[in-house]
Amino acid sequence: MLSRTAAHLYWIGRYMERAEFTCRLVEATIRLDSLGHHAHGEQAWRSALSVVGIPGGARLGGDAFSARAARRYLTIGEENGSSVRSCLAAARDNARAARTALTVEVWEAINRAWLLIRDRARPGAIQSTLNLVEDLKAEIRGFEGALARMLRSEGSWFLRLGSAIERGDSTARLLDVKYYLLLPPGQQVGGALDRDQWSTLLQIVSARRAYRHIYRGPLQPWLVADLLIFRREMPRSLAASAEETVTLLSAFAGRSGRQGAADRAARRRLTRIQDLSIETVFQGGLHEWLHAYVRDNAELDSAIAAQFRFG
Amino acid sequence: MARRNAFDELWGVSRGRSARPALEPLARWLLQTPTAELQRRQQTAEAAFQSLGITFAVYGDDEAAERIIPFDIVPRVFTAGEWERLSAGLEQRVRAINAFIDDIYGERRILADGAIPADIVLGNAQFCIPCAGARPPHGIYAHICGIDLVRTGPDEFWVLEDNARTPSGVSYMLENREAMLRLCPELFGILPVRPVDSYPEMLRDTLYSVAPGAAHEPNCVLLTPGPFNSAYYEHSFLADTMGIDLVEGTDLVVDDDIVWVRTIHGPRRVDVIYRRIDDAFLDPLVFNPESLVGVPGLLAAYLAGNVALVNAPGTGIADDKAIYSYMPEIVLYYTGEAPKLPNVETWRCREPEALSYVLDHLDTLVVKLVDGSGGYGMLVGPTATRAEIEDFRDVLKAEPQRYIAQPTLSLSTVPTFTDDGLVPRHVDFRPFVLTGANGLSIVPGGLTRVALREGSLVVNSSQGGGTKDSFVLAADAGAGSP
């Protein structure tokens, strides 16, 4: 496979994953906003912006901060490189450039998602934003379904590798923004306000039901952190993303008979997570640990680019 | 004007009273299928094209950076007899083109014999000076030719232009057929339509056949300028259906006159490049130094015989409309026969008498740039305004050698769906001729372009043209169901 094609595929995986994450972030924030009174709602949007790395006081593409401006900025903001529109545009540009490496189904799913948002000039009322996000999520699920039906070879591995790396990054960032809510076991648990926050967090990673199935009890903040970091059966957990990265890199190594720096870094990371427990993480500081994870993930991303000659 | 007496591909000159022989089933189908149903199917086809991303870019039109080419659901049909005559003419013409290009970059016998003027070749901007004296692997230059034909009557086919550089449009032939099979499957039951889906395999065989040397399984790639090129969809479609890599200039590197492609496992040697980049941008070391889409050193690798370029550099000279005007002489010179497919009468504005005739008849002629394509820089006299004609007159007088003129032909029409229902619209036709080391092949079909505006004769997709499927009937035509 061409190095350039491989890089395009990897970035399609990353951008589609990021588009979906931002969709769920918007959806969950709308829900949190509607649960509380006005001031509570604004805080919800500020926090959503900081998850995708936009600082508190930033102007949103010319608009002063408001819940509505944040909603626009996250969905269709062209000046925001992480908006759903920008992610889908970038995914589609990469897909166009790597068209021959994609099946018609994969291409169509990306293209249809892009066409859904391309001509949107404003996010509309809350309900219309929710509809848009719902439709986009359906197209992105179509993309994931089409991925599963691609040839099990380099092409689909690069797409999934991009998704896995992006997933690790977004879950870690999400946790980090809410880290002050995720208290260690034994601490005084907050009121209804905090519970709304935890359930929002679970919704963003589509894990509200999963939590009930795994822990069978009331929401506990340290268990929310445990689920999103350590539970390998939870597809958007850090452990699952680390494991998938190792599996995909081994698939390449199995094909070429060679391993590189990326394989070693990915295995080291997985072992570290497997040896840890949520108690240990809290002892060292959740915030510090998450920071280190995001940094390791970025280093792994560079190692992958070097190993497969993306440059 | 032209439309009134135009020959119709379906109805002949009967003005809708009786279909031409072998086309009756199509006429019945067209009359019996409700208009609303045809319209629904046509919209379905266009939605499918949009979703597949079968688009083209229009240069200088930011708003519509990507548009789909309008597709018309009523096919254009060739009978078995018509196709047989056309094929013979196409084969003769393409053989002559290849012999001509081989000659002018080699011995130049045709110039020495004075069959055509030497300056029209050697002084031509399309003449590739660095290519002179070099013979491509297997001696083939124009592996892929698209010959544009128009029709004016039952037996009157004319060659409008030759495309021996990088002819495009074949993906529409294939996608239009897929759309017709999905939307109008019953048509294939009532007409014995010959399939076109073997084209990618034929093209692949052609590419493999011209690989230099036979030491190993050849590695063929398709070189595209990239996703911003107007024909990018076609590039990716062809690479995909042939199962070869679609590469950009930056994916290739030339080392010691050998071409390599960068892969995730390191460099891999390349033997054949189906390039969809014009000569001028192919190699910044030899041609346009500003080119960012080419590959430095590529021409040296080609001249060293280490890689086949499809089509070979320098073939663009056969597209030149001044050369076109000498094609009857060229065909006669290399085949010893009169051309089976005639040229359209052509005035070369470089000749003073021709120029003065053209200047006196601008309102009835079509005037074209000798090296133009895509319908840019041309004047269609009968539909131009007074002011446009006068502006063009100045342009023409300033550089007459850049232009040729042809009469406005009464192009044949095919019934076509528009907002006003089913109406006749003018069409042309581009069949594709492949030449490999094992001979010449023609797929039974091609690209029919249709001018969607009433009375318009300009079919170029960049100028508001659309496309239709082109059916070639098998020899047992007439065996349609009752």
Image (tube, coloured by chain):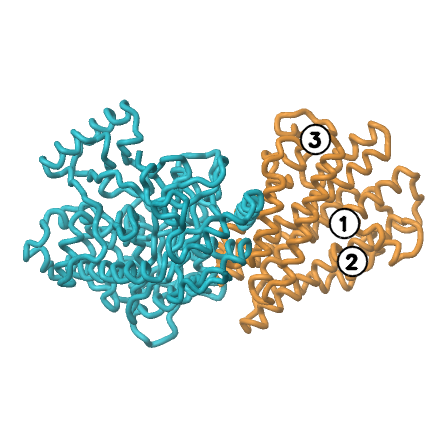
Q: Are marks 2 and 1 in contact (CB under 8 Å)?
A: yes
Residue B471: percent from left, percent from top = 41, 57
A294 or A213: which is nearer to us?
A213
Q: Is residue B285 visible?
A: no
Q: Which of the chains bears the disc numbered 2?
A: A
Q: Residue at x 54, y 71 (%)?
A: A256
| Element class at badge 2 | loop
Q: Colour of chain A?
A: orange
Marker disc for residue B168: none
Q: In this rendering, would B252 be left or right of A293?
A: left
Residue B186: percent from left, percent from top = 53, 58
Marker disc for residue A124: 3
Mark 2, residue position: A234
Tell if the residue under mark 2 belongs to the same chain as the one under mark 1.
yes
Q: Colour of chain B?
A: cyan
Tell if the residue under mark 1 belongs to the same chain as the one under mark 3.
yes
| Element class at badge 1 | loop
Check the picture and name the quadrant holding the N terminus of chain B. Answer: top left
- Residue B363, compared with residue A140, is above or below; it is above
